[in-house]
Amino acid sequence: MPVLSVQTPRAQVSLHSERLVVLRHDAGEPAPKSEVPLGELERVVFAEGVLVSAPALCELLKRQIPVTFLAWNGRLLGSFEPPGPPRGASRMLQYQLTSTPAACLTLACKLVHAKIANGRRLLQRLDANHRCLEPALLDAMEARERDASRAPDLPSLLGSEGAAAALFYQGWARFLPAEFPFGHRSTRPPGNPVNACLSYLSALVYGELLTACVVRGLDAALGCLHQPEDGRWSLPLDLMEPFRPALIEPLTLRLFSHRILQQGHFEAHDGGTWLSRDGRRTLIQHYEQRIQREFLSEHAGCRTTLRQQFQNAAVQFKLALAQPQAYAPFRIN
């Protein structure tokens, strides 16, 4: 089912019968309105400058269609979803697990192990056609993968993750076109177009996983790899780690190597480089196409989509609250 994304500042979204009516304004002139049947929508994404009527929001909630609001830089501002049923027992299990260092470390190790394994698999796929990576780089990543599976404590695990990330980006950057150099990972603000794309995609995945956690009654503030602290939702940050090399980095590479994103899709702001409005629209379009595309997953044992696997990540974490050793994060084929 399609996703409605409205990124035009001052666009107006209202409800008419069983349709959302979107009226965009460009350079002060009203554009022809467009209508979207509610029955065809799976979710809605609005930029912060969009004007949405209360009846439209209420009808979306009644139909259990999630609504996400994003800032111009991709930061998640908030989301609307219908309240789920009370899940006190699950919350108690989660509180118990996150206050037990050994159980927390078990889940964190599995998340990092899956992230490194997925990253190594992505590099192997990319190198199959180009043959530009040294075997030593992949061997070093495999060694960090083994380290992550048996880390004695969280600092050691984070060290393995950091070392593997440095190796991964060293190899991954070689497949980018010359006009879009990567340099190194930079955030707050992103230092170049590649980092801007990585950060915006991360924000989109983070928002979806946050919603998946909340809907299933999990406390999104309590993570295992990202330790709980005020001011952030640690659990979706945990759950998104295996999806970075499964979605965020390969989609970024595709957008640049196929010249889908170009220099005109970026602009300088607040000391960094950010996607323009057209850039955000283009990125969201390709993001939605990718996460809704079906594929045969060896991990799931069936045909699925990445969006379904986002939901499954929250379900599997909830099941692992009682059995941490049985937890199996997402793995790419």
Image: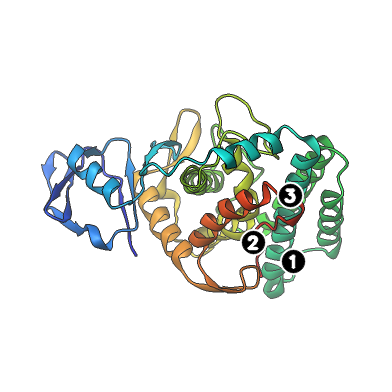
Crowd class of label 1 (few under 14; some 14 to 19; many from 20; radius 10 Å): few
- Rounded to the nearest angstrom, the CA distance separating label 3 from label 1 is 39 Å
Can I make out residue 53 in this image?
Answer: no
Q: What residue sits 49% from the left and 72% below the top?
A: 294
- Mark 3 or mark 1, earlier in chain: 1
| CB within 8 Å, label 2 to label 1 | yes
Crowd class of label 3 (few under 14; some 14 to 19; many from 20; radius 10 Å): many
Residue type at the position of mark 3: Pro
- The secondary element bearing badge 2 is classed as helix
| CB within 8 Å, label 2 to label 3 | no
Identify the image quadrant of the C terminus. Answer: bottom right
Q: Position of residue 119 (x, y in %)?
A: 70, 58
Q: What residue sits 73% from the left and 57% below the top?
A: 326
Q: Quadrant of residue 74?
A: top left
Residue at the far top: name it: 230
Horizontal side of 216 relative to 23 (left or right) equals right
Horizontal side of 236 relative to 74 (left or right) equals right
Residue type at the position of mark 2: Phe
Q: Which residue is mark 2?
A: 175
Q: What residue sits 46% from the left and 28% below the top?
A: 270
Q: Which residue is mark 1?
A: 132
| CB within 8 Å, label 3 to label 1 | no
Q: Position of residue 129 (x, y in %)?
A: 68, 75
Identify the image quadrant of the N terminus. Answer: bottom left
- Mark 2 or mark 1, earlier in chain: 1
What numbered label is drawn on residue 324? 3
Q: Quadrant of residue 102?
A: top right
Horizontal side of 176 relative to 169 (left or right) equals left
